[in-house]
Amino acid sequence: MKDWLKDLPKVELHLHIEGSLEPELMFALAERNGISLPYASVDEVRAAYDFNDLQSFLNLYYQGMAVLRTADDFHDLAIDYFRRAQAEGVVHVELSFDPQAHLSRGIGFDVQMEGLTRAMRHAEREWGLSTALIMSFLRDQPAEDALAVLEQAEPYLELIDAVGLDSAESGNPPSKFAEVFARAKSLGLPRVAHAGEEGPASYIREALNLLDVCRIDHGVRCLEDSDLVARLRDAQIPLTVCPLSNVRLKVVERIQDHPLPTLLEAGLKITLNSDDPAYFGGGVLDNYLVCEQAFGWDRPTFVSLARNAIEVAFMEEGRRQVLL
Ligand code: HPA
Ligand code: ZN
């Protein structure tokens, strides 16, 4: 089954590229940029990845990405990830990035875009790996800052496939970003948002009603609202679920407690993703494997999960038809 799952063509819709920064590359980039890290070794970094909740993870996530300074750093980060992803049978990656987390450290938008898009072109050429870029806004920062970033991104809109919403969810409802997302919509940008990871089911409703999103990232707490589940099912709104992430951030206690089987039984359009693979103990294949171990799903179930992601990905129709 492991080989079969590896060979199954998989599409990744929920991946924070900054969360793919492995400790080895963190050390290499720190050295290249003359930055000293608060860790003595790669093992010490990994030992620090013991999280209580989303915020305790985000603290290390923002600290780790401080080694990214130049376009080459962003390029090398993405290449490192694309290489691993294609080796585990991923054929399309939708990477999100957090421009505000770099702008606030003095790293220009142009620097970020140059490095990431160069890596995306390379992945296509070298591995036939297609990619899409999602620009995410930090929901724990003011909406005005997100609007300013969107303005800065306007010369690059051809290179951006969608906007997203991430970072600390509790207390930062989608409604805070209604104006930003309306502006993104007027610019022709598709929209996605994290909702119902740590936040309540009402945040998923808000993301649908006020941000007009076409996908929900995580969304596992939808089960607390049966009317919402019916709506998500009827409209077949995709949920980009990340099982290893949910365990590591204690959204669920153990993988066996994960609501994935219930979400599937409810007829929801579910996809499996890695979120922040360097921090949560594995990539897309590991997320498929942990489900196989915990739930004993058969091959047709995994085929349908993989197809769901192909169907709703931001990709050219010709490419989609080849993959379907
Ligand atoms: N949730 C919210 N924001 C994030 C995450 C996450 O899992 N990873 C990176 N930013
Ligand atoms: Zn995420």
Image: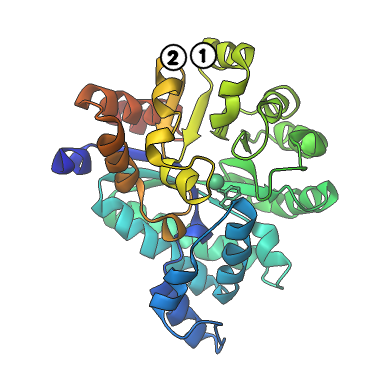
Q: Left or right: 152 with respect to 11?
A: right
Colour mapping used in the image: rainbow
Residues at badges 2 and 1 in contact (C-beta under 8 Å)?
Answer: yes
Specify the label residue 233 is tagged with: 1
Residue placed furthest toward the bottom? 34
Judging from the image, what secondary structure is the residue with disc 1 in? helix
Q: Quadrant of residue 42 in the image?
A: bottom left
**Ligand 2 near label 2 (Cβ, under 8 Å)?**
no
First in sequence, mark 2 or 1: give its number.
1
Judging from the image, what secondary structure is the residue with disc 2 in? loop
Q: Quadrant of the C terminus?
A: top left
Q: What residue sits 32% from the left and 26% below the top?
A: 321
Name which residue type carries label 2.
Gly
Name the residue tied to disc 2: 267
Q: Position of residue 301 (x, y in %)?
A: 28, 23
Q: Quadrant of residue 203 in the image?
A: top right
Q: Nearer the viewer, residue 117 or 140?
A: 140
Q: Left or right: 24 with respect to 233?
A: left
Q: What residue sits 70% from the left and 72% below the top?
A: 105
